[in-house]
């Protein structure tokens, strides 16, 4: 999850484990074309002032031409949009902050059928349990008639801890948190203070659901082998098995936590997106298992969109939200 400090704009289970092993590899190769794919970008605007969830009012938000969006209330800011498309409706779940920086986030939600006329919904996920200090970034997937929202819960009791939780919904608007909570905790060799941003998707080739989680090894022989996306797999979205590191992330600026990851398949290529340092970087592979390669120009971001996640819109279009 990424928090913003700016005055202008920024671009629009019943399983636990304490051990995990696995391998991943990466190479460098040239390829271009993803910018042509992401031809329309929705931009969320940000404000820096602490805000209060109790005063957020969906009914006063703009409902037309929302390519650029900022909450109407002066003291709110938005972050980490999580787009999702299902049955002709493009949903954008996003973090509403009312306590600044790393505490107090909840999920807000708006949707559209035509990218012009928008509906603002009631808050999708809020802080309701004593140990919850933030409902953090995640992803939504539809399976067997239900919407599943996977998210990170952040606590601040006895030191910062993050773990994966999930909720279900019959309409994609009102979500009910599920047990067990936590659903997945960090394995012993990984940092429990940085275990967030679960991205869940279904892969036809493996016939399984996959989850990528932002984290890092507590100890590593080299810095480049520390920060990673940790992969889990499942057949039912409830019972998850750790498969080890999916990808170790870095850029020309160095190594860091790969936040707000996204992965999708398009025209024979798997595209992996993640945010580190100054923007959203992407990698490509013909196989879900890699190797993922970096094109010469691998940063998709600009001054207006630093953290991008994507979702399809119809059959031949994909939209980035940042």
Image (tube, helix red, strand yellow):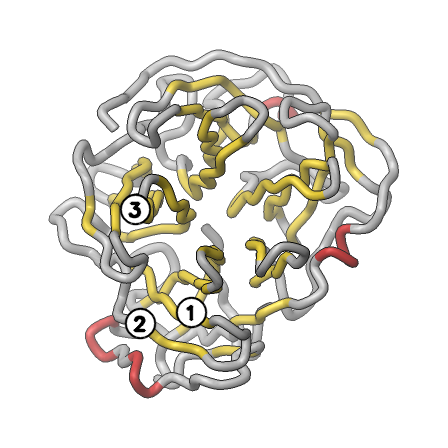
* Residue 242 screen position, x and y as percent: 42, 19
Residue 217 pos. (x, y %): 49, 23
Drawn side of residue 283 relative to residue 297, left or right:
left
Task: Say which residue appears at 50% left-offset and 78% top-offset.
Answer: 69
**SS at mark 3?**
strand
Residue 208 pos. (x, y %): 46, 25
What secondary structure is marked by label 2? Answer: loop
Viewer-nearest residue: 171 or 38: 171
User: For the view shown, which residue lies furthest in the left direction?
Assistant: 130
Is 92 drawn above or below residue 135 in the view shown?
Answer: below
- The alpha-carbon separation of the residues under discs 3 and 1 comes to 17 Å
Judge by depth and name the residue closer to the eye, 242 or 186: 242
Q: In terms of depth relative to the viewer, which is nearer, 180 or 202?
A: 202
Mark 2 surroundings within 10 Å by alpha-carbon count, few (fewer than 14), some (14 through 19), many (20 or more): some
Left-right relation of 257 to 211: right
Write the residue at 52% across / 79% down. 66
The answer to whether residue 104 is seen in the rendering is no
Q: Are marks 3 and 1 in contact (CB under 8 Å)?
A: no
Q: Which mark is residue 5?
A: none
What residue is pinned by disc 2? 121
Residue drawn 40% across the image and 48% down it: 140
Residue 138 sits above or below residue 55 on the image: above
Q: Which element type, helix, strand or loop, lies under badge 1?
A: strand
**Disc number lying in front (3 or 1):** 3
Marks 2 and 3, how far apart in space? 18 Å
Q: Is 223 in front, or is 151?
A: 151
Q: Is residue 224 left or right of residue 77?
A: right
Disc 1 + disc 2, Cβ < 8 Å: yes
Report which residue position mark 3 lands on.
Answer: 146
Residue at numbered disc 1: 111
């Amino acid at each position: 999850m990424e928090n913003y400090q700016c005055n202008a704009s920024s671009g629009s289970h019943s399983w636990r484990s304490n051990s995990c092993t696995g391998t991943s590899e990466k190479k460098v190769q040239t390829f271009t074309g993803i910018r042509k794919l992401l031809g329309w970008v929705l931009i969320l605007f940000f404000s820096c002032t602490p805000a209060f969830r109790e005063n957020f009012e969906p009914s006063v938000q703009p409902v037309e031409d929302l390519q650029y969006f900022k909450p109407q209330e002066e003291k709110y800011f938005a972050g980490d949009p999580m787009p999702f498309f299902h049955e002709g409706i493009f949903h954008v779940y996003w973090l509403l902050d009312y306590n600044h920086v790393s505490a107090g986030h909840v999920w807000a939600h708006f949707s559209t059928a035509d990218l012009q006329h928008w509906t603002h919904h009631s808050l999708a996920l809020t802080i309701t349990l004593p140990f919850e200090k933030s409902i953090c970034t995640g992803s939504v997937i539809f399976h067997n008639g239900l919407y599943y929202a996977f998210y990170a819960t952040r606590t601040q009791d006895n030191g910062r801890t993050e773990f994966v939780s999930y909720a279900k919904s019959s309409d994609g608007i009102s979500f009910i948190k599920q047990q067990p909570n936590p659903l997945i905790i960090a394995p012993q060799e990984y940092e429990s203070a940085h275990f967030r941003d679960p991205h869940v998707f279904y892969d036809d080739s493996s016939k399984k659901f996959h989850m990528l989680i932002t984290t890092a090894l507590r100890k590593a022989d080299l810095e480049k082998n520390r920060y990673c996306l940790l992969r889990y797999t499942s057949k039912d979205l409830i019972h998850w098995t750790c498969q080890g590191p999916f990808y170790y992330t870095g850029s020309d600026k160095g190594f860091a936590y790969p936040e707000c990851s996204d992965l999708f398949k398009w025209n024979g290529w798997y595209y992996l997106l993640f945010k580190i340092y100054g923007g959203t970087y992407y990698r490509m592979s013909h196989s879900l298992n890699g190797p993922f390669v970096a094109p010469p120009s691998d940063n998709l971001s600009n001054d207006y969109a630093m953290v991008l996640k994507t979702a399809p819109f119809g059959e031949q279009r994909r939209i980035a939200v940042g």
